[in-house]
Image (tube, coloured by chain):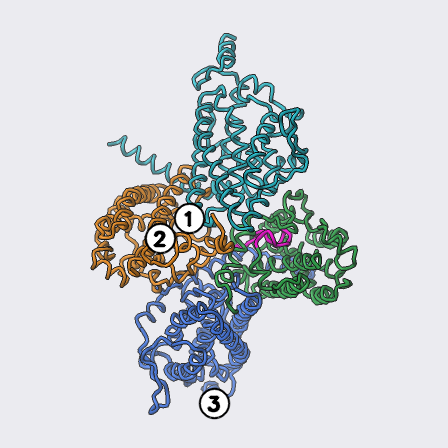
Chain colours: A cyan, B orange, C green, D blue
């Protein structure tokens, strides 16, 4: 009880909980699940954008995209490392991912169908991710908060690159402008879904808020994202595909239409356009690489044994 | 001049096409750390390719740039050796061991080449080489480390490593055969005569093979090519179809 | 009219893209007889595609022909359902069983469709349908025979057949969802309302499943698409890159 | 001896030997090897042209090419059937092919690098094959001769289609004309090599001539091919890449340069550009398909058993 009170004091004072500190089991479990899902999202998130590396239409964009996808692998690595400070095991988390027992962000279950999607993912998807993640830089668990600071910094950079690609394309040919508009049409609603169910439906929020693992409700973050994005869309010259979207001077916010929650749950439950494909891709990479990891481990063990003898 | 443009294309295309092949591993590597490492190597090579293609575009004098050269040339205009275009995986054409085998050979050869090219009379080639030496030294080391691990890991990984070397070995000879352009520019102090590199490459590879307890492959050189003349393998057309499709589909687009 | 052109593209693209997929088996089939059979089916579908794309080009009134439609449209302009573009092998995306599973579903649906389309008020569609009925009846029979063999062959082949059906089943629902163009033209007696086909398709498939002692797959419909609106799968871009690359690389060429 | 004299009488009279007839062991073995190699050539020959089906630049050419490659599979089937009338087993012949114990025409060890290669293969490679094969329509073994009649008829059709493609391309853009010329440059010498070693080097010819399995020497056929092809090249507007090629009025034939026999033997011995690739492709298709063939056999056996009971 002493320990629990100390933990609560630290969290309430917005101080950091560190790996060696006592923490409640529920806190540990909730964090492991959240960090793992976040790590999985980075790793699965490599696929929709990685899909365009080989076809990038200029060498500069190819380099930017390759570097971005590489950063995502790096983010996955930090985050798995943060989860490991809580006693999780990376191999075990990977198994949970590829057997569907742990989730990742549903946005990556949508296909990327043109090079404009690369820009729109940078602008909207990374934008929404940043809205979700900036508060996590102040989250109560130290290693997670520090990982998020680095992740957010790099994601802001990616977001600017995505938006800049779209600005360039909008200054190009008519075909390019239409390509951007189509990408926006496909990704706008799924981006709004990234904030999760509406507050009236959302579970776990209260406890997570108290633990400072979560700092704003889904609907608050979603509203913030919409308000931030509408002027960017105008500057870009694209139309956000929502006839109900308009400024509400009374609320001081934009009103927007109702999300298609049927689609939301369909994708969450595994029947999105790419759920099966994404998990299968990850599973195959993991299984195809098993012999390489085994070889590296066997070699390291032999070497260690030899050094021990010497 | 034409020769300088052709030579810059040869070195640039080698880097571009191998970068394209290595980038295919992205999200498919055996572990996340290797995803990062292979992407890094691909990025380094892409950077070298961009500088060299830009040099070729300048030397050529015709209105073109790195992108027109990368995306609007037809297969027979690509000057890379066949070694870099072969499908070494991921996928049915090869596996991680074949990828490492090719990288080992390529980086060993290219490091020896760039070290000498630092002394080129062409200031751009010299500068590209000076930057590249540091990068490719890392690539070579990375491939050598994995060669040791795979050859000395499990019985299966050793088999794969041997098979990977056998897959790429028939294309190695082409690296040492001087194209007339290389010969002329080497005489002029601009390029490196590839025949000069053989002793050093052999020595480095033999050192790695000895450390890994591997036999040097004995497969004969493969007829055909040379890639430097634009005569490639059947894999090349598919690689270019994928690489060039979007660029070619949207003429006049800004990217 | 625009609707007629769009409808001819829908049916034409289904045939074209599946033909492209089936032709990938050429020189890779499990036996020579099957190499011949799959090439035959691919040829029949290619023939249907050419007639339908030509009809679309005429109806559209813009200066285009079967080749500009096949080779110069971008991905979002293709109107095929996602079922036909999915990678069902050869290669890591699937295998012979997945190919047969898709062909069984596709041919069953298309035969039901063409049988009704014979009565179309558009004389060209009616003629294409009349010719296609005979061809597709053979395709359906071929797929059904292989379904029986694989389901009733070895334990392994039975597993593969079940996995193949599971792979394609989530895309089946899309076949029965009327696009506004289909709905309008069905009202006008030109097209067939796809919803009308469901009972017949279900009955035929159930007959095959019963004979093969297979359960009808239960996988839910996959979100996304529809292909009829030009929203495809990630496999489509690669298919088009390969299919269109040479044509797009040589503008103005004669073939 | 009676049987052997009868056999020799039949052959010398240009009559047909049929499967049920007595024949010398050497005749049977030589024929099996020759027919099998011919069948293998059809099957391996599907690959270099099949390589362009997915990328054919017009739908008409795609249909023509697909039909042609399909015909090659058909030719392989007739020829394996002809070999089976001599007691050979198709599975055994396939094993010999994929383990490198039986050969196929070396021409297919060259890569096809542009769509013009499809035309040049039709014109030159099918042209050379026809020169080799027309005499076999009168070969002494009945089933082989009948298969060859059908094969030659279809190959003549393919050759005309190939030449017609080249005529069309030569009437197109400059890029197309250069593409055709490059394809001719790559395939001319390998086509001449299709007739085998020069007569001074060739083995087995004498016995095969006596048995009417072979009816002309390699050099005779090669000369015939050159004489036939030169005017076709002129009509097409391409240059055959041989500076020594010219009409010799005294011989009444074209003189031509010396074949690079080093390359010839390099390719024959397995180090051609595509030997490894072609055999591996065939091996993989055969092995990947094993479970399907097993399933079909198992199903047929079950069905037969059931019918037997009923």
Q: Residues within 10 Å of mark 3 (few under 14, many from 20)?
A: few
- Residue A59 disc label: 1
Location of the C terminus of chain D (image quadrant): bottom right
User: Can the viewer see residue A254?
Assistant: yes
**Chain to which the residue tagged by mark 1 belongs:** A
> Disc 3 vs disc 1: which is toward the camera?
1
- Residue D9 disc label: 3
Residues marked 3 and 1 touching at CB (< 8 Å): no
Magenta span: C74-90
Q: Is residue B153 above or below residue A19?
A: below
Spatial CA distance of label 3 from label 1 is 74 Å
Location of the N terminus of chain D (image quadrant): bottom left
- Residue D154 disc label: none
Q: Nearer the viewer, residue D252 or C170?
A: D252
- Residue B53 disc label: 2
Number of labelled discs? 3
Q: Residues within 10 Å of mark 1 (few under 14, many from 20)?
A: many
Spatial CA distance of label 2 from label 1 is 10 Å
Residues marked 2 and 1 touching at CB (< 8 Å): yes
Spatial CA distance of label 3 from label 2 is 72 Å
Q: Is residue D226 left or right of residue A178?
A: left
Q: Residue at x 53, y 27 (%)?
A: A34
Residue C46 at what x, y percent from top left?
61, 64
User: Can the viewer see residue B169?
Assistant: no
């Amino acid at each position: 009880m002493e320990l629990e009170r100390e933990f609560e004091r630290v969290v309430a004072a917005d101080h950091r909980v560190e790996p060696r500190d006592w923490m409640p089991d529920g806190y540990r479990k909730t964090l492991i699940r959240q960090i793992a899902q976040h790590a999985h999202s980075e790793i699965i998130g490599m696929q929709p954008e990685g899909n365009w590396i080989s076809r990038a239409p200029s060498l500069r964009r190819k380099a930017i995209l390759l570097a971005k996808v590489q950063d995502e692998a790096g983010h996955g690595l930090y985050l798995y490392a943060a989860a490991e400070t809580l006693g999780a095991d990376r191999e075990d988390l990977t198994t949970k991912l590829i057997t569907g027992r742990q989730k990742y962000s549903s946005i990556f279950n949508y296909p990327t169908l043109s090079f404009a999607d690369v820009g729109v993912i940078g602008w909207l998807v990374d934008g929404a991710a940043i809205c979700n993640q900036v508060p996590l830089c102040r989250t109560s668990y130290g290693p997670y908060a520090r990982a998020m600071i680095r992740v957010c910094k790099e994601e802001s950079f990616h977001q600017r690159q995505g938006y800049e690609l779209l600005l360039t394309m909008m200054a190009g040919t008519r075909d390019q402008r239409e390509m951007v508009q189509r990408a926006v049409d496909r990704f706008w609603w799924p981006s709004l879904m990234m904030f999760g169910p509406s507050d009236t439906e959302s579970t776990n929020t209260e406890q997570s808020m108290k633990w400072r693992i979560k700092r704003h409700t889904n609907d608050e973050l979603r509203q913030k994202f919409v308000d931030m994005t509408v002027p960017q869309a105008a500057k870009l010259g694209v139309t956000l595909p929502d006839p109900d979207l308009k400024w509400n001077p009374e609320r001081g916010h934009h009103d927007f239409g109702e999300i298609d929650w049927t689609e939301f749950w369909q994708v969450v439950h595994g029947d999105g356009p790419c759920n099966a494909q994404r998990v299968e891709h990850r599973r195959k990479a993991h299984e195809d690489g098993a012999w390489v990891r085994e070889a590296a481990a066997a070699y390291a063990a032999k070497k260690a044994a030899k050094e021990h003898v010497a | 001049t034409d020769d300088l443009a052709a030579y810059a294309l040869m070195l640039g295309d080698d880097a571009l096409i191998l970068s394209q092949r290595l980038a295919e591993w992205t999200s498919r590597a055996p572990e996340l750390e290797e995803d990062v490492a292979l992407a890094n190597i691909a990025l380094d090579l892409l950077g070298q390719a961009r500088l060299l293609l830009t040099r070729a575009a300048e030397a050529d004098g015709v209105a073109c740039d790195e992108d027109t050269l990368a995306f609007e040339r037809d297969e027979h205009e690509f000057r890379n050796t066949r070694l870099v275009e072969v499908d070494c995986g991921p996928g049915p054409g090869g596996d991680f061991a074949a990828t490492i085998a090719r990288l080992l050979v390529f980086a060993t050869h290219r490091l020896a080449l760039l070290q000498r090219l630092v002394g080129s009379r062409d200031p751009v080639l010299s500068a590209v080489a000076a930057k590249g030496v540091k990068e490719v030294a890392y690539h070579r080391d990375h491939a050598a480390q994995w060669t040791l691990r795979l050859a000395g890991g499990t019985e299966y990984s050793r088999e794969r490593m041997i098979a990977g070397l056998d897959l790429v070995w028939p294309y190695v000879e082409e690296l040492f055969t001087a194209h007339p352009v290389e010969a002329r520019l080497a005489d002029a102090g601009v390029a490196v005569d590839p025949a000069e590199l053989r002793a050093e490459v052999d020595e480095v590879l033999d050192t790695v093979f000895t450390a890994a307890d591997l036999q040097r492959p004995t497969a004969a050189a493969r007829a055909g090519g040379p890639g430097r003349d634009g005569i490639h393998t059947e894999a090349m057309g598919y690689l270019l179809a994928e690489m060039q499709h979007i660029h070619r589909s949207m003429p006049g687009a800004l990217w």
